[in-house]
Image (cartoon, rainbow, N blue to C red):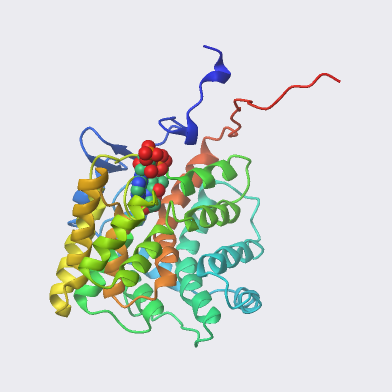
Amino acid sequence: MNELEKFSPGLDGVVATETSISYLDTIQEEIVIRGYDLIELSKSVSYVDIIHLLLEGRLPDQSEKNSLETSMLERYELPSAVFEVLKLLPEQTHAMDGLRTGISVLGGYDHAIDDRSMLVNKERAYRLLGQVPSIVANSYRILTKTEMIHPDKNLPYSANFFFMVTGRKPSPIEEKIFDLSLLLYSEHEMPNSTFTARVIASTQSDLYGALTGAVASLKGNLHGGANEAVMHLLLEAGTISKFEELLRTKLSNKEKIMGFGHRVYMKKMDPRATMMKGALQQLCHIKGNDLLYHMCEAGERIMEREKGLYPNLDYYAAPVYWMLEIPIPLYTPIFFAARTAGICAHVLEQHAQNRLFRPRVKYVGERHVL
Ligand SMILES: CC(=O)SCCNC(=O)CCNC(=O)[C@H](O)C(C)(C)COP(=O)(O)OP(=O)(O)OC[C@H]1O[C@@H](n2cnc3c(N)ncnc32)[C@H](O)[C@@H]1OP(=O)(O)O
Ligand SMILES: O=C([O-])CC(=O)C(=O)O
C-alpha cells in the first residue's frame, strides 16, 4: 500500500509517540501512570503525590510531598497584569477562554522563556501548578464581577483550590472527594489536549504556548467541555423520568449524549467514572439528597440498553462538582487545572526527545492542468 493511503480518520488507533508517562492498558484494564495503575493509586495517595510522580517519575516520600505542597502554594500569586488583562474581557467570555488568556499572559513574565532545559521547564511546571488554579478561580470571579480571592496558605493544595473556587473551606469528606477528582483528571495518555500540547511543543515552542493550545482543545464538548454539558442536561431534566425522556428524545434525533462514550473505552465504563460514581453516592448520602445519583443511574441504564455506551469520567464528575457547590462554568477549567500536571509532563518529555510532528494528508480534491 502507498504510504499516503494509510489513513485513519481522527487518527483512531494511530500511535503518535513513545512515552514513559502513561498508557491505557485495555487488556489488563489499567490506566498506567509511570508504571502504577491510577485507580489503585487513588485508594492510597493524593493528587500532590501524582504531580510528583508525573514530573519526577516516582512517588514522593512524606517530606518531599510536604515541601512540594508548600512550594506550589507559595507560587499561587500572579502578576497583577494577568488580572488587568482579564478585566478587559467581555462579560460573556467563558471561563476557559479567561484561563487561556491568563496562561498566555504569564509567558511574557518568564525571563528564561527560551530555556527549554529539563531543569528550567520543571521549575516552570511547578510554578504553573500554583498559578493555574489561581487563574481558574480569579478569572471567573473577575468575569462575574465578584471579589477576588487569595490563597489560604495554611490549607493543603486541594483544599485551598476548593476554597478558591467556592469561597468556603471544604469539610474533610469534600476535601477528599475534590482531591480524588483532581487525581482522576490528572493524566490520561494521549487525549486531544495532550496531543495538541505535544504538537505545539514539537516546534520547540514554549510550555505556555503548549498549555494555551491545550486549554482551547479541552474546552470542546467532545472532550473536557462535556462535564459542563452533562450538568446542564441533568438540570434541564430535573427528575428521573424527564431525564430518561430527554435522553430518548436526543437519541432518536441522533444527537450525542454528553458524558458517554470514549475513543479508547467504547465498550466499557471508564474506570475513573466508576470511582466518581462511588463518590457521588457518598456525597448524596451525606447531603441527604440522592436525586442526582438516581438520575445518573437511570441515564446509564438507558445508554447501555439503547446504544451499548458507557459513562466516561465527565458524566459522574459533573454531579459530584454540583454536590460540592462548585459553579458550573468552573467544571472544565478545574479539569484543565488538574490535567496541567500531565500535560506539563508530556511537554517536558517532548522537549527532551523531540521530533517535529508533521503528518501527511490523503488528498481528495481535484487536480487541474493549466
Ligand atoms: C474526560 C473526557 O474528555 S472523556 C470524553 C468526553 N466527551 C463526551 O462525553 C462527548 C460525548 N461522546 C462522544 O462524542 C464520543 O463518544 C467521543 C468523542 C468521546 C469518542 O468519539 P469517537 O471515538 O470519535 O467515536 P464516534 O463519535 O465516531 O462514535 C462512534 C459511534 O458511537 C456513537 N456515539 C459515540 N458517543 C456517543 C454518545 N455520547 N451519544 C450517542 N452516540 C454516541 C456515534 O454516534 C457513532 O455512531 P455511528 O457509528 O452510528 O455513527
Ligand atoms: O482520553 C481521552 O481521549 C479523553 C479523556 O478521557 C481524558 O482526557 O481524560
For ligand 1, the image quadrant comes to top left
Residue at 67% over, 27% down = 365
Q: In this rendering, would 174 be left or right of 201?
A: left
Q: In this rendering, would 221 be left or right of 177?
A: right
Residue 248 sits above or below residue 37 on the image = below
Residue 313 sits above or below residue 235 on the image = above
Residue 322 sits above or below residue 9 on the image = below
Q: In this rendering, would 218 be left or right of 114?
A: left
Name the residue nearer the viewer: 220 or 338: 220
Residue at 46% over, 83% down = 149
Camera sees residue 188: no
Residue at 21% over, 66% down = 241
Counting the numbered discs, the total is: 0
User: Quarter-wise, where is residue 86 in the image?
Assistant: bottom right
Q: Looking at the picture, how far across and down is residue 99, in whole percent?
A: 53, 66
Query: Which residue is situated farthest in the right direction here?
Result: 370
Residue at 56% over, 51% down = 210
Q: Looking at the picture, how far across and down is residue 105, in whole percent?
A: 63, 66
Q: Looking at the picture, how far across and down is residue 176, in whole percent?
A: 23, 69
Q: Looking at the picture, how far across and down is residue 300, in whole percent?
A: 22, 54
